Amino acid sequence: MLLCSVISTTLHSRSRRSYTGYLLVASAAVLWATSGPISRVLYDQGVTPLEVSFWRTAAAAVLFILRLRLTRSSANAPVKPKHLTALALFGAFGTGAFMVSLAYAIETGGINLAVILLYTSPVFVAVGARLWYHEPLGGQKAVLIAITMLGVVLIATGGGRGISVSAVSLAWGFAAAFTYATYFLVGKWAIARYSPLQFLAYVFPVAAVAILPFVRFGTYLLSTFLWLALLSVVTTYLPYLLYYRGLAGVQISRAVVVATVEPVIAAIFAAAFFGELYSMQALTGALFVLAAATRASMPERRPRAPSKRPSEAEKIPTYAVPPYGPAEPENEPEEESGG
């Protein structure tokens, strides 16, 4: 009787923890979805995409550093000197370039186009994983890439109200997707060695420093500072913390699927506040992109003997990440000294 009570309590505790985890992940996705509308407000106040990118990155960097300093954990061991160069390069050319390209994608093409193009990143991830990690590019991945590109073609030719499809907006959108894909590829390597908070506290300051030389600051109103604060805290700092807190109680592959509510929420915000609406053709294309991105985020099914239990590496996709940041991949063995 006592054993049954203990088992029932344990299952209930796990179920509640899982529910809370999915709720945290969904909350993070909703906060990420507000990035486009807040950026649009700032653009209307005369703030440039470069200024938005810098302030968002710099303020979040300060918050991540403070959080890291206040967090005592054995996972936050000092970064090894041989890894500093790689993290710095990623901070400058991955995080920094991503923030800038996403900001320009929103300004030139609208919120809906920028966000949906971001979900073409599995195409770049699949190619990068093949070149970098020698992962096989099988038939299923090829089909998903084809579906993604078909979706993009439908969006580009379908457009919609308030959606500006041009060579420039598509270029910025794909640039954002490409740099976003580097989070998947570099994150697989980095998060296997350092905690997510530690990783973010290192790359965000580098990104801010990399963007700074290109920024020409204007004169801001008080409301501008308030919107910039919202952008930094609500769309960058808090979502990361919520997402990683949520991952403690759920599978990463399922968490990524939950996070795909972001473009849906972003589309609702864009329609409600800025009158952006997909045409039926473009909406069909957007659904193709989302479907392909969702399937790409799930672990692949591999045939195995009935008696063999699935390993953690089989449960976790090799490039499962939340929007705008890397998630924890499967653990990798520490590289040999001198490597």
Image (cartoon, rainbow, N blue to C red):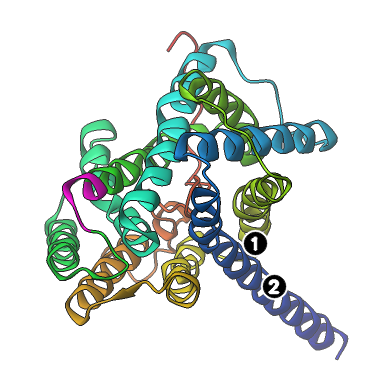
Q: Are marks 1 and 2 in contact (CB under 8 Å)?
A: yes
Q: Is residue 194 visible?
A: no
Label 2 neighbourhood size at 10 Å, few (<14), some (14-19), many (20+)?
Answer: some
The percent position of residue 67, horizontal first and vertical second, equals 77, 38
Inspect the image, locate mark 2, and give the three-letter code of the amino acid beneath it. Answer: Thr
**Viewer-proximal residue, 20 or 318?**
20
Q: Residue at x 71, y 80 (%)?
A: 11
Q: Residue at x 61, y 26 (%)?
A: 205
Q: Is residue 155 above or below residue 174?
A: below
Q: Earlier in the sequence, mark 1 or mark 2?
A: 2
Residue 47 appears left or right of 116: right
As helix, strand or loop, the secondary structure at mark 2 comes to helix
**Viewer-proximal residue, 238 or 336?**
238
* Magenta region includes residue 41: no
Label 1 neighbourhood size at 10 Å, few (<14), some (14-19), many (20+)?
Answer: many
Q: Quadrant of the C terminus?
A: top left
Q: Which residue is mark 2?
A: 20
Q: Farthest residue toward the top? A: 338
In the rendered structure, find residue 246 and report the number of the disc placed on it.
Answer: 1
Res 154 → quadrant? bottom left
What secondary structure is the stretch in magenta mostly built from? Answer: helix
**Viewer-proximal residue, 63 or 232?**
232
The percent position of residue 104, horizontal first and vertical second, equals 37, 43
Q: Residue at x 76, y 76 (%)?
A: 13
**Viewer-proximal residue, 133 or 102?**
102
The percent position of residue 256, horizontal first and vertical second, equals 46, 63
Q: Residue at x 50, y 25 (%)?
A: 215
Residue range of the region highlighted in magenta in the rendering: 165-170
Q: Farthest residue toward the bottom? A: 1
Residue 271 appears left or right of 242: left
Q: How many marks?
A: 2
Inspect the image, locate mark 1, and give the three-letter code of the amino acid beneath it. Answer: Gly
